Image (tube, rainbow, N blue to C red):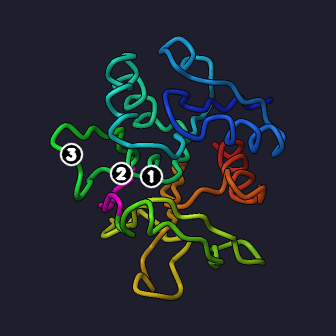
Amino acid sequence: MTSRIGVLALQGDVREHMVALEAAGVTASTVRRPAELDQVDAIVVPGGESTTIGKLLVTFELLEPLRKRVRDGMPAFGSCAGMILLADRVLDGTADQVSIGGLDMTVRRNAFGRQVDSFEGDIRFVGLDEPVHAVFIRAPWVEAMGDAVEPLAKVEDGQAAGRIVAVRQGPLLATSFHPELTGDLRVHRLFVSMVREA
């Protein structure tokens, strides 16, 4: 059976995720409406601006259907803003911050600082032989997580050393960095394998 993976296409790195998913061997389609959500087996929530994506989820009447699908076990992968949206708890959020939820963790928005504090670095990622080159843009990090959440990657140097930047909980995957921007398909391939397992 061929899996169709949707990319939430309200704002952010939509095209980059579409390209990465197609290169990883799956059919990708954009999701902007509940009817389009019904046609996919899994969803990618891209990097972008978490509060903007959250407001658009409400406007496009996608928030509740997406929450329900994730609660019911649909695989989901969130990068950067997507990690914030998949977290059950958000620190430094706006007053009207909404969350899809599903990942039993607390994330801190813009944890690494402002746009000027964006950076790149190589990090070890559980299950991958070679380090992943990670691009962090106003990225979150994981402050706390429940027992069911498995940490997959941590920052290794600098002031943020030891901070968790990738996690998995069952069919849910999240990274605070942007694997869709580097041409390295390994994180997307991991998600594709999770979708096929589900």
Magenta highlight: main SS: strand
Residue at left offset 49%, top offset 71%: 151
Eye-nearest disc, 3 or 2: 3
In what element is the residue under mark 3?
A: loop
- Residues at marks 1 and 3, CA–CA distance in whole angstroms: 16 Å
Q: Amino acid at mark 3?
A: Thr
Where residue 190 sits, quadrant-wise, is bottom right
Dots 2, 1 in contact, CB < 8 A: yes
Q: Which residue is mark 3?
A: 94
On whether residue 122 falls in the magenta region, the answer is: no
- The C terminus: image quadrant: top right
Q: Counting other residues with Cα less than 10 Å from the Cα at mark 3, is it few (<14), some (14-19), or many (20 or more)?
A: few
Which mark is on residue 87? Answer: 2
Q: Which residues are magenta?
A: 103-110
Q: Amino acid at mark 2?
A: Ala
Residue 117 percent coordinates (x, y): 44, 69
* Residue closest to the eye, 44 or 179: 179
Residue at left offset 78%, top offset 55%: 183
- Judge from the rendering whether residue 154 lies leftward or rightward of residue 21; answer left or right: left
* Residue closest to the eye, 45 or 39: 45
Residue 43 percent coordinates (x, y): 57, 35
Q: Amino acid at mark 1?
A: Met
Instruction: Specify which label sits upstream in the sequence, 1 or 3.
Output: 1
Q: How many marks?
A: 3
- Residues at marks 3 and 2, CA–CA distance in whole angstroms: 15 Å
Which residue ends up furthest to the front in the rendered image? 116
Residue at left offset 42%, top offset 28%: 66
- Judge from the rendering whether residue 109 lies leftward or rightward of residue 168; answer left or right: left
Q: Is residue 125 above or below residue 14?
A: below
In what element is the residue under mark 2?
A: strand
Q: Which residue is mark 1?
A: 83
* Residue closest to the eye, 61 or 157: 157
